[in-house]
Amino acid sequence: MQYLKELLAMQNSRISQALKLSLYGLEATLNQAKLEYPDDPGSELCEQLISEIKEILTSPTITENIEILDNQKLTEHTENLALIESQSSNLLDELRTRFENDLELKIYLGYAPLESQSDNELWSEIHRKLLRVPEDVATIWRNRALEIAQKVGATRDYVNMEHLPFARDEILYPGLSGTVEARGLCLSKKLLLKSEISENYQSEELQLLAGFLLLYEKFIDIDPELNHALKSVFGFDIVSLKSQPEQHQLFLQTLSDRLQRTQKYEENTDPILILSAWIDIDEAIHSLVFLPPADRYSWWGKLQQESRKVLKKLADQARKAGYDIKIKQLSGLYADICAYTKDDLQLDYGGTPGEVLACLRLYVKINQEENPGRVIFRSLR
């Protein structure tokens, strides 16, 4: 500690100045880590270390030396900041241009321009969009985006992450540090288990549904491109959740109500009541959509399919109980499946003309009773 203070107190020393800046950076990093991981076993020691760093940096001698930086050093510091800003704008320009001009991406994402005005926003916006395209395409673009970021001095960062509650842990995309600071995004089972709602849903299947509810609440807040197409809430069109906040609340409330009903029927143990409740909540889960809808082989597509994997198991259980169950996930040419649907929604962009873009509700036949499905399809024009 003695040598540390002596070096910090030294005037006209570049090494001393580098040490001061490093300590300020360490203090900021520790403060951020403390906020990100409040239950970490090292939190108490982290707080003590932050206090020690503050004490060192605020001592009179060191404070005085920081304030009397000569004009040459101040000029160098300003030039470095200008260089960083220039590099960041290069990242913004190159990444934006290449992303917006990629014709393959337009098939999956449409033609809407990127809205971000800063590098950190751009990094997040692009990576959220990549969650909607097929995984192989997304992987290519994630690597490409990282290469562009690295060219301007940014590095991949798995510490600066925003955590969203769900039924498993998963990194959706990393953040950046260095010349560009951007937060990554990940799923956290710990956040789900710590939530109040989790205490009410103990089975693995209900935990999954609770995870969908909490994840959707958070994702709607961070992604302005999300819409809903839930018929019982608004049956005539696909509704933007950003521009119509009342629809935002109605959609989440309906999802919550269907979750509670599913729990109630699971306690009843009637396989048909349980299956019917899952069909309803599966519809709500699949009715959170983008325009055009996410590709079925994208991260979003695979995420929403998780409820249908459970549905398939429940249908098998009902068959074993003696019921005649037929379930169809509607896809392919709309002309081939429209006999199984009702109140469908039409788009004039995205995907292939004449094909189903998203299956919102499954077609189900229980014994002799038919329940039509519902889809979003691309018009032939």
Image: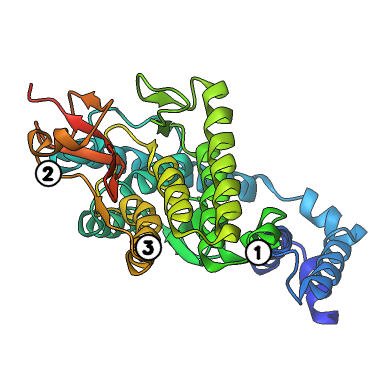
Residue 21, quarter of picture: bottom right
Q: In this view, does 215 lie to the left or right of 73?
A: left
Mark nearest the camera among 2 and 1 is: 2
**Counting other residues with Cα less than 10 Å from the Cα at mark 3, is it few (<14), some (14-19), or many (20 or more)?**
many
The amino acid type of the residue labelled 1 equals Leu
The amino acid type of the residue labelled 2 equals Gly
The disc at residue 332 is 2
Residue ID at (57%, 22%): 246
Q: Position of residue 43 (x, y in %)?
A: 78, 70
Q: Position of residue 359 (x, y in %)?
A: 27, 41
The colour scheme used here is rainbow
The residue singled out by tag 3 in the image is 318
Q: Where is residue 115 in the image (x, y as percent from the top left)?
A: 39, 29
User: Can residue 163 be seen?
Assistant: no
The disc at residue 148 is none
Residue ID at (39%, 39%): 89
Residue 38, quarter of picture: bottom right
Mark toward the start of the polypeptide (3 vs 1): 1
Residue 202, quarter of picture: bottom right
The amino acid type of the residue labelled 3 equals Ala
The residue singled out by tag 1 in the image is 193
